[in-house]
Image (spheres, rainbow, N blue to C red):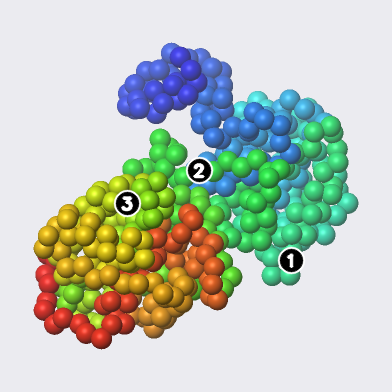
Amino acid sequence: MSNVALAELYAGMSDEERAYYLNRLSKVEQERFFHRWDIWARPDQLSPDQDWSIWLVMAGRGFGKTRAGAEWVRNIAEHNGDARFALVGANFAEIRMVMVEGESGLLSIAPPDDRPLWEPSLKRLRWENGAEASLYSAAEPEGLRGPQHSHAWCDEIAKWMNNAGQAQAAWDNLKMGLRLGRDPRIVATTTPRPVPLVRALAKDKSVTITKGRTQDNHMNLPDVFLTAMETDYGGTRLGRQELDGELIEELEGALWTRAMIENCRASQPSTFLRVVVGVDPPASSTGDACGIIVVGLAADDKGYILADCSAEKVSPEQWARAVADAANIWGADRVIAEANQGGAMVKSVLQAANVALSVKLVHASRGKVARAEPVAALYENDRVRHAQAFPRLEDELCGLLIGGGYEGPGRSPDRADALVYALTELMLGKSKKPNVRNLN
């Protein structure tokens, strides 16, 4: 049986089964069993097989980043008495509380017969074989100027203070002092945030990166916690960053910001004055996605983004059916589609999918950004709501830049274009139908 299979088997045992299994082991065997990292670690918590000098573990909360960093230090320290570590955190209190004394810290994970000597007054850990680890605060980068090390573990680098450039200075001083031994290495563990140091490491091709989600560690986390996190934060910017481990960057000069979108989340009303479906048809079945966004206008005069039904790499008949289905499900009174790609064919394909479908074609005579600017102003004026999280749509919105240009995912902001067509029809047009639609 593999070590991974053994860990999964143990995790699935009842309390009685675990007690029976452990009682068959001697006391020494029990201690070794619980301190065998090769048994308990997931593959993504182990250092990469390929050659590397910087290993960045960038993952969601509860993934097991701290344990991975501490076990990496422990493994080297127990086998190399010449190892000299730098343990670097946001401040000394956090280093002690998390990296040294925490549940996944160096003292907790060490076997009783090989636990390092902790000297708090000296900010130092010492192993019996001579290996040492010294503590350094990233808020005091000058402390790393001078000392030499063979290895370093840097924790939560996204939290390092940087209002006066301390984070980058601490990182630079650390690297310049990493000159002992033949193979100096740095492990950085962090929940991603788009701060300069994390962004620079994420873009550095020489850095080996491990990414992961909170869900990856489900065997060691309570089900009620995972369910609550998904319910409260799934798909939101905070959830994608803190749970899914995504590095979500803010583009300078973007029409939409992450904060703007997060501030517009709201529950869906039960009735709407109008519901329309915005469509940005693809040029071909092998090209960009067909953006299909459902938007409703409520009695409070706010537009509500209700659904993202976009379809990728499908035939005209398939995306037309997806549009018709979206219109039927949400009771839309009109489909707003860009006519540039195929002209009249767009209308004929849509109506072939549903003869009762009202279709309005719009001609995109202006650039994408010019069309989007008035819609972005609706968001700024608190007139748009997102009834749920739409990660792919929201990424596209935040990729549209003031003055022209698109730097979001994919070649084209298909979902964002469809949203623009729909909100323009509902909130920037000349008329609004007064009839009320009940979506319950």
Residue drawn 18% across and 75% down? 274
* Disc 2 from disc 3: Cα separation: 27 Å
Of residues 305 and 209, which is closer to you in this image?
305
- Of the numbered discs 2 and 1, the one sitting upstream in the chain is 1
Q: Secondary structure at mark 2?
A: strand
- Tell me the number on the disc at residue 311: 3
Q: Amino acid at mark 1?
A: Gly
Q: Assign the C terminus to one quadrant of the image.
A: bottom left
Helix, strand or loop at label 3? It is loop
Q: Residue at x 39, y 28 (%)?
A: 11
How far is disc 3 from disc 1 in space, using C-alphas?
45 Å
Q: Position of residue 147 (x, y in %)?
A: 86, 48
Q: Earlier in the sequence, mark 3 or mark 1?
A: 1
Contact? badges 2 and 3 (CB < 8 Å): no
Image spot of residue 223 (x, y percent): 33, 43
Do residues under tags 3 and 1 come within 8 Å of each other at their CB atoms? no
Q: Residue at x 59, y 38 (%)?
A: 68
Give residue 167's position: percent from left, percent from top: 71, 60
Q: Which mark is residue 165?
A: 1
| Residue 381 sits above or below residue 183 on the image | below
Within the image, what quadrant is residue 91 found in?
bottom right
Disc 1 residue crowd, few under 14, some 14–19, many 20+, Cα 10 Å: some
Horizontal placement of 400 versus 148: left or right? left
Q: Amino acid at mark 3?
A: Ala
Report whether residue 116 is seen: no
State the mark number for residue 212: 2
